[in-house]
Amino acid sequence: MTPRLPKYLELADRIRLDVLHGALPAGSVAPSENEVAQCYGVSRQTARRTLNELAQRGLLKRSRGQRSVVLDRVGPHRPVLYAPGQSDTALEYVPGAVYSVSAFRQETADATVAAALDLQVGAPVVHVERRARVDGAPIMLLRTWLTSRLAAMLEARDFEDRLFVQVFQRANLTIARSREALLACVADAHQARELEVAPGVPLVRVRRIGYSIADVPISLTYCDFSPRARYARSGYPRIADRLSGRGRRRASAVQKAAR
């Protein structure tokens, strides 16, 4: 039986997506404990743990007696350590998603990979490609390059005989922090085939560089979201929607008072 992810971590990742995609822009007022509790139907304690987790990851600034503030979405963020069996070095936790490995091979680092991992061009690296599906539909393509040292720590020689998420649980334990950046791209032939979209379709891409405890870059991941990637979020309440509604209600109240 797959252990469930703690509720506060699941909510923290949902809100983190809102920050990452700009629905909660840097400098804006973050949701309060009451708003998180009401929006997601959880206790105040769970809401508090959710916001504290986001603050620990560097996404919120919390001050006693003041409203929390959303920090810059591009910066050093702590990765999440998921529950065993649900762990993944993927950027996003998606409820109900099934991750599969489509490629695992040794390569030499090109200029982009070498620059991200602070290696020499041509240095040996391990390339892992994964695809996430929800209800059979592909919604994310994840391409990760690992330093050969990290791959050895994962005992990658036995990789294909192991459950991917179990192996990458161990990888997560070696990553002390990560730096993420939101990018834009259009689907090339390979992305289009893997995500079952037409070539040239705009995709949202997130780049994540993972750093070791010694602050050395050890992994580079590109996470390409299918245009249908809003799929799973459409069924869930979003704190950004609740906050925008709060703003509209306040504006309406001000207008009524002015009359």
Image (cartoon, grey):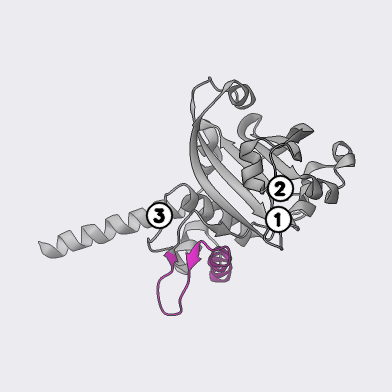
The kind of residue tagged 3 is: Pro
**Which residue matches tag 1?**
82
**Which residue matches tag 2?**
88
- In front: 16, or 214? 214
Q: How many C-alpha atoms fall within 10 Å of the one at disc 2: few (<14), some, or many (≥20)?
A: many
**Which residue matches tag 3?**
25
Circles 2, 3 touching at the beta carbon (< 8 Å): no
Which residues make up the magenta segment? 43-69
The percent coordinates of residue 122 (x first, y second) are: 73, 36
User: In which quadrant of the rendered view does residue 78 lie?
Assistant: bottom right
Residue occupying the point 49% across, 50% down: 20
Residue 64 belongs to magenta span: yes
The kind of residue tagged 2 is: Asp
| Residue 251 visible in the current orientation | yes
Circles 2, 1 touching at the beta carbon (< 8 Å): yes
Residue farthest toward the front in the current orientation of the protein = 120
The percent coordinates of residue 108 (x first, y second) are: 74, 35
Kindly state the secondary structure of the residue where label 1 is placed: loop
